[in-house]
């Protein structure tokens, strides 16, 4: 009864600002969050050569026990994590996570059938799937370049891989009747000063053009390109910078992916969203938490995540912005990491829908900037947590106070028994 009374009081407080909390909850229920699969095994994948070395600007640190070592364990862990996350969920796959049945299938040979396990899994649970070609942790990336390589043979290999990844994504989207995003990220770059930035960018344009030649129904596949400021071992420059991909995406009328860890520390993704949306068909978000560098820490409810969701809401763009997570931390319980990160994103979405944007804009139109600032301050003390708890209760999801117990029980019952 006390929980219900707390929510009713919160509902009344928000109603005084013109916000219906029930409507806000319904809005976030229908907004999918794409949760990445690679948190569960530290970006290892299931290729027959064994666990991939995290290379090409990617590094998951830590050796917390219980890491998933096969596709069955990973799906078990994902099921558990998803049971702790409210709302509509999708799963983002990397090409290295195919069901290869122990066979050596190189990346330029992947087929849709290698992902039928995931298709069945998603269909049974009512989840959508997203896709990512895997252009790192491979011998043909050892020289630091894939699509932007000066070696035509290497470029051709990766062009074929991206083309086949798009085919897989379109297949998954068609079979599930749910749009599949195909996010292209390359770690290519140089550790130190190079005179050849323009050379590699010329090759990258040609490679992307060839990889994107095949067209697929827009209801099945959405292509996107993801920029990065630097990678581990590629600190001097990356050919796939934000400027490069913004212009390329605009030319090709595809989406761009904004990762919250892929920019200068003073750059804010929340400021980029409304600048990009008028010019591109869609924006993908990869939400993580960079600390000093692109360290892909678990997403938490910090001001930038709150501001990102607020900007999407203010732009009325949840239909054009595809929200996803991207972090990998092997130093803590991986299921807990998934749950914490995705729940933080859901919290930020709810926070955005509880903002009285019209009232704030009315003050602004009146040039009453004190009232605008005062209302922003008032919102910080609103009973947001009571609305969040009510949302979780309605979804049958444990509240924050019980999350740790649920995660630790799974660790004791399942993770601790793995070799």
Image (tube, helix red, strand yellow):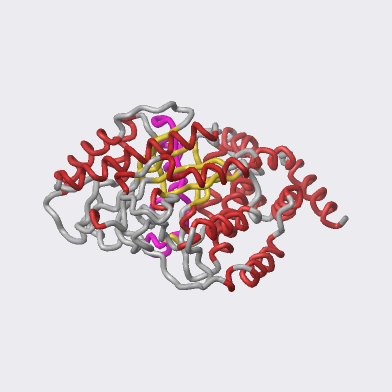
Q: Position of residue 188 (x, y in %)?
A: 25, 52
Nearer to the camera, 346 or 116: 116
Nearer to the camera, 230 or 329: 329
Q: Residue at x 25, y 59 (%)?
A: 234
Q: Is residue 400 above or below residue 286?
A: below
Q: Position of residue 157 (x, y in %)?
A: 24, 45
Can residue 383 be seen here? The reply is no
Which quarter of the figure is the N terminus placed in? Answer: bottom right
Q: Is residue 42 above or below residue 325?
A: below
Q: Residue at x 71, y 39 (%)?
A: 19
Horizontally, residue 190 falls left or right of residue 45, namely left
Q: Position of residue 203 (x, y in %)?
A: 18, 41
Nearer to the camera, 17 or 306: 306
Horizontally, residue 72 falls left or right of residue 42, namely right
Q: Quadrant of residue 77?
A: bottom right
Q: Which residues are magenta?
A: 267-295
Horizontally, residue 326 falls left or right of residue 211, namely right
Q: Residue at x 31, y 33 (%)?
A: 212
Q: Position of residue 170 (x, y in %)?
A: 43, 34
Q: Residue at x 22, y 56 (%)?
A: 144
Residue 283 among those drawn in magenta: yes
Can residue 164 be seen here? The reply is yes
Nearer to the camera, 328 or 419: 419
Residue 194 among those drawn in magenta: no
């Amino acid at each position: 009864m006390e929980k219900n009374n707390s929510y009713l009081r919160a509902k009344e407080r928000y109603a005084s600002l013109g916000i219906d909390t029930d409507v806000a909850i319904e809005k976030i229920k229908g907004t999918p969050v794409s949760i990445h699969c690679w948190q569960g095994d530290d970006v290892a994948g299931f290729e027959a050569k064994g666990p991939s070395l995290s290379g090409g600007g990617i590094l998951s640190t830590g050796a917390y026990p219980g890491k998933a070592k096969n596709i069955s364990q990973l799906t078990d862990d994902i099921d558990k994590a998803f049971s702790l996350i409210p709302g509509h969920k999708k799963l983002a796959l990397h090409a290295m996570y195919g069901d290869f049945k122990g066979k050596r299938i190189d990346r330029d040979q992947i087929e849709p059938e290698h992902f039928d396990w995931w298709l069945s899994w998603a269909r049974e649970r009512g989840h959508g799937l997203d896709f990512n070609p895997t252009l790192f942790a491979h011998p043909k990336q050892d020289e630091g370049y894939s699509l932007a390589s000066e070696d035509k043979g290497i470029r051709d290999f990766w062009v074929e891989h991206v083309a086949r990844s798009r085919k897989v994504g379109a297949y998954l989207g068609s079979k599930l009747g749910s749009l599949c995003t195909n996010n292209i990220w390359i770690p290519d770059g140089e550790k130190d000063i190079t005179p050849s930035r323009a050379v590699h960018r010329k090759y990258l344009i040609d490679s992307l053009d060839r990889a994107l030649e095949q067209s697929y129904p827009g209801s099945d596949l959405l292509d996107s390109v993801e920029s990065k400021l630097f990678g581990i071992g590629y600190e001097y420059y990356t050919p796939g910078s934000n400027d490069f991909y913004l212009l390329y995406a605009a030319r090709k009328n595809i989406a761009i992916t904004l990762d919250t860890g892929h920019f200068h520390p003073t750059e804010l993704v929340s400021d980029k969203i409304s600048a990009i949306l008028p010019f591109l068909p869609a924006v993908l978000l990869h939400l993580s938490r960079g600390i000093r560098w692109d360290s892909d820490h678990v997403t938490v409810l910090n001001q930038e995540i709150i501001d990102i969701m607020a900007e999407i809401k203010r732009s009325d763009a949840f239909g054009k912005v595809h929200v996803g997570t991207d972090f990998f931390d092997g130093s803590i319980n991986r299921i807990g990491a998934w749950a914490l990160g995705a729940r933080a994103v859901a919290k930020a979405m709810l926070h955005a829908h509880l903002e009285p944007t019209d009232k704030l804009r009315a003050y602004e139109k009146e040039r009453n900037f004190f009232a605008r600032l005062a209302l922003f301050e008032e919102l910080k003390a609103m009973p947001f947590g009571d609305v969040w708890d009510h949302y979780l209760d309605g979804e049958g999801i444990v509240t924050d106070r019980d999350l740790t117990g649920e995660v630790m029980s799974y660790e004791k019952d399942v993770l601790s028994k793995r070799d």
